Image (cartoon, grey):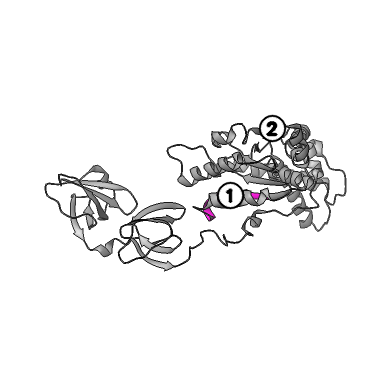
Amino acid sequence: MSEEAARAGNSRTVARVSHISDDGRTTFLELRDGRTATADHEEPFADVGEIVLIDPEDGSIEVAPRDLWREEVWVGVTKLVVDNRVVVEIGGRLRLFPVPHNENLRAGLTVEGTDSEGIVGVLSSKAISFLDNSTEDALPERFIVPPDEKLSFEDFGGYGEIVTRARELIELPLKHHAALNEIGTKPIKGILFSGPSGTGKTLLARIIANHADATFYVISGPEVLSKWYGQSEELIRRIFEDAKRRERAIIFFDEIDSLASQRNDESHEASRRVVGQLLALMDGFSPDTNVMVLGTTNRPQDVDSALRRPGRFDWHVDFPIPSREDREAILSTSGRKLQLQEKMPHDWVAERTDAWTPAELAAIWTEAGLLAVSEGRNSLLAEDYIGGYERVAKQRRDSRG
């Protein structure tokens, strides 16, 4: 009994014989959790496909009833039938199985099966959709964020140089696409917004999309990989195709590092496929395509290096922790629509909030509002503002230990 089998557990473990060596002395076992083990012996004790029970304490192995191995039944779509073999797409992966006897298979069937038996039956003569309503053209519209007419650059405080640079890279090319084509300059395809969480990357992108009158698609990396697992690249392709039909569009990837992380030997297959799809889509932009691709990340080094090469996400805008002047501007801007009874000490608070993000600064107003309402007032005093600062400061200290 090998060391690996002994580590499989402290109680008897169910396994399946997957292979037997040519000399019959080594049996390869597949465990229920996907791991493998080997058993060395003088005489074969089971045939390929049989179920066995392993006792790691004494190293014994005995043949067990097949019912102990409850295989998960998968559902897939036949993609290609060649002679006696069929290619089945299961959860976004292509698998090859033998054509079962007495089954007249063709491409486009919904079938069920198991890993050991292959296809065991046909469920439908039509292909099941792995994407919700994937046959409908309306699917990409789920990711469109409607423009907010109340949102403007006046709602974005501080970061003056960053705002100017982002508008140059995004708004100008979208609004003056034809003119730039006539000049013959190399088009900007992708821009990476980097910086700590809460620095306003998404807010600025929305404001620019509003101002440029651009259709704004928002794709959350974690959501796409989890909810549409196995079909992420198809979903992204449809969004790009829809965006190309618009007069101007911005495709915004929030937390792009979670969707298109650096590829290596340990990378998840879904992530590798998404990166490949993004590369193909961005390289496939024609001169007539008036689409800008934005991505946000607080770990730019984790974004796949191929996506950061020229012609892709090769433009970079960094959102640092705000300076003292920026903090004062952010405080003033985030509170300008509130009911204030008196002038607020923005300079006093800005002086004491070094290393705070814009989101943390805005939270001061929320706490100030709670203090005012708790005392029966419908407008804010300076003491509420200072009290709000003290509450958020305490939360920051507590969260950092």
* Residue 26 visible at all: yes
Residue nearer the viewer, 388 or 15: 15
Residue 302 position within the rendered picture, expressed as x and y whole percent measured from the top left: 54, 36
Q: Which residue is drawn at 54% across and 49% down?
A: 233
Residue 6 position within the rendered picture, expressed as x and y whole percent measured from the top left: 25, 46
Q: Any magenta on residue 22?
A: no
Residue occupied by mark 1: 237
Q: What stretch is highlighted in magenta?
A: 217-227
**Relative to 4, is 84 above or below?**
below
Residue nearer the viewer, 337 or 266: 266
Q: Residue at x 66, y 33 (%)?
A: 315
Q: Given contact means CB atoms under 8 Å apart, are the residues at marks 2 and 1 in contact?
A: no
Q: Distance between the residues labelled 2 and 1?
A: 23 Å
Which element is circle 2 on?
Answer: loop
Q: Any magenta on residue 218?
A: yes
Label 2 or label 1, whichever comes before in sequence order: 2
Majority secondary structure of magenta residues: helix
Residue at the left extreme of this rendering: 42
Q: In which quarter of the image is residue 159?
A: top right
Count of numbered tags: 2
Residue 135 position within the rendered picture, expressed as x and y whole percent measured from the top left: 57, 61
Q: What residue type is labelled 1?
A: Arg
Residue 229 position within the rendered picture, expressed as x and y whole percent measured from the top left: 50, 53
> Disc number at residue 186?
2
Q: What residue type is labelled 2?
A: Lys
Which element is circle 1 on?
Answer: helix
* Residue 364 visible at all: no
Crowding at dot 1, Cα within 10 Å, few <14 / some 14-19 / many 20+, comes out as: some
Crowding at dot 2, Cα within 10 Å, few <14 / some 14-19 / many 20+, comes out as: few
Residue at the right extreme of this rendering: 342
What quarter of the picture does the C terminus occupy? Answer: top right
State left or right for residue 133 relative to residue 294: left
